Image (cartoon, grey):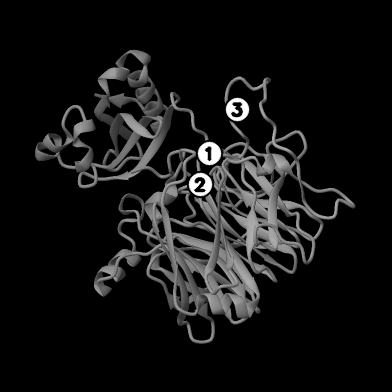
Amino acid sequence: MTDASQPLAHTPQAVTMAGSEGLWAWLNQQHISLAFSTYQTNRLFLVGCKADGHLAVNERLFDKPMGLYVRDNSLYMACRYQLWQLENRLAAGESHQGGDRLYVPSRSYTTGDVNVHDLVVTADQQLLFINTDFSCLATLSEGHSFAPLWQPPFISKLVAEDRCHLNGLAMYQGQPTYVTACSTTDTAAGWRKHRTDGGVVMHIPSNEVIATGLSMPHSPRWYRGKLWLLNSGTGELGYLDWQRFCPVSFCPGFVRGLAFWGDYAVVGLSKLRAKTFGGLVLETRLADLQQASQCGLAIIDLNTGALVHRLHIDGVVEELFDVVVLPQVRQPRALGFQNDDIDRLINFPQSGGLVSTKPTVSRPSLSQPVQKPGLPRNDKNAIHYQRVYQLSPENLVPYEAMTNPSLIAHWRTQPLRGELLGISASVAGEMVGFAVAEQWHLPDTAQAQAQLLSLWVLPAYHAIGIEAALRAHLQHWLGVAISQ
């Protein structure tokens, strides 16, 4: 029901992957590996080739990994409140546990939770990123969380309201040149009402909108003289011919994450979330084809538009965000923060490769477990409040036990007048409270009205102020008085 995932416990849940026949051979022949992120389950995956003809998959947990970028020996990654630089610590010809690349988290930059999507690194090593919450292109700035570089001309103010869902960035001749957004709205989360055809592509140097009518576009990339992008809401990979989007291939999933290699495109696919992605052309098209949406990677031949290879993903992972190609890499690996490899694997000039230090028997200074940076937070007793979008009487039915008064009974006598919005309260990933309000506008006026329809808190949590906090969060979000 929510627009972002709950924090993942530190014990990984089941993920299954299956490559199509020929995927291993293609990766091996092209001398490449792939890396992709899934913020939904806080994972970075590295996929390469084992010598025995099987895929090699390396999985690491990070806190909400999203945009990825590869430059030389570094892999850059946007996370919840940090930008990470992972450096390869293996020299040419060196290996570690079968891998010929070992990406180690070496630097991080704290931006705060600004919902960073795409990121790139310029030739002079400047990190640029799409700051989605503040609707701008930004960079790092000493003494600040970020420094805005550009904002769409229709955005009147830089506030953390995700007004147009600015998400994708394309470079041209080394300069940030094109961006994608889900709408041209200038109100808090206004893009959510324009998911089917409000998407745009903008040209940064001219401040002009150069393409309209798209459905939640993502991942613009300049490649071989064309601006390619993913029209996510229709499931299509295509390119712009002046202002016209020209689809090249249809994929059975919400497409997001795009990389190129030779005559091929690598596209990330996500399963549809009915509460967020409902009503899209993709949903109708899949229904007509009697197909379910899929999660994984699709390798597309740019000459024919055919899906020639696939990596199918099942289990807890249902959504991907970004994908990159790792050239001349056979079997990549990365260090995470869950075991002591990050503590013990050391190298330095003239070390002759990686050195494994002796494990420490005990750490008397650490009497309590310490949250390691970069890992998903696991605050067992913390109360997390989260906005819930795209509610409907239908998708609220499974949550009837969490409504008071009954919303099913409400709909029997009251028609839906506007948009349903909610705030959830959760502890350790389990919902313990839920508030739902309805907001609408009076006829022939822009004046907004709001009514609290339901407020429920688990009895065991009544005494700690969750009910009042839910009301306060709703009031702040809506910005108007809420009637009972």
- The image shows residue 296 at horizontal and vertical percentages of 45, 64
360 or 410: nearer the viewer: 360
- The image shows residue 250 at horizontal and vertical percentages of 41, 75
Mark 2 belongs to which amino acid?
Asn
Question: Mark 2 Cα within 10 Å, few/some/many (few <14, many 20+)?
Answer: many
- The image shows residue 344 at horizontal and vertical percentages of 72, 41
Residue 42's mark?
Answer: 2
Sequence-wise first label, 3 or 1: 3
Q: Residue 383 appears in which quarter of the rendering?
A: top left
Instruction: Determine the secondary structure under disc 1.
Output: loop
Residue 149's mark?
Answer: none
Answer with left or right where residue 224 lies relative to residue 317: right
Q: CA distance from mark 3 to mark 1?
A: 13 Å
Which residue lies at the image location 49% right of the left edge and 46% below the top edge? 163
Which residue lies at the image location 51% right of the left edge and 61% below the top edge? 218
Sequence-wise first label, 2 or 3: 2
Q: Quadrant of the N terminus?
A: top left
Please name the residue that numbered disc 1 is placed on: 376
Q: Is residue 368 above or below residue 347?
A: above
80 or 206: nearer the viewer: 80
Mark 3 belongs to which amino acid?
Val
Q: CA distance from mark 1 to mark 2?
A: 7 Å
409 or 332: nearer the viewer: 332
Asked whether the residues under the numbered discs 1 and 2 touch, taking CB atoms below 8 Å apart as contact, a structural biologist would say: yes
Mark 1 belongs to which amino acid?
Pro
Which residue lies at the image location 20% right of the left edge and 44% below the top edge? 393
Asked whether the residues under the numbered discs 2 and 3 touch, taking CB atoms below 8 Å apart as contact, a structural biologist would say: no
Please name the residue that numbered disc 3 is placed on: 370
Q: Quadrant of the C terminus?
A: top left
Q: CA distance from mark 2 to mark 3?
A: 19 Å
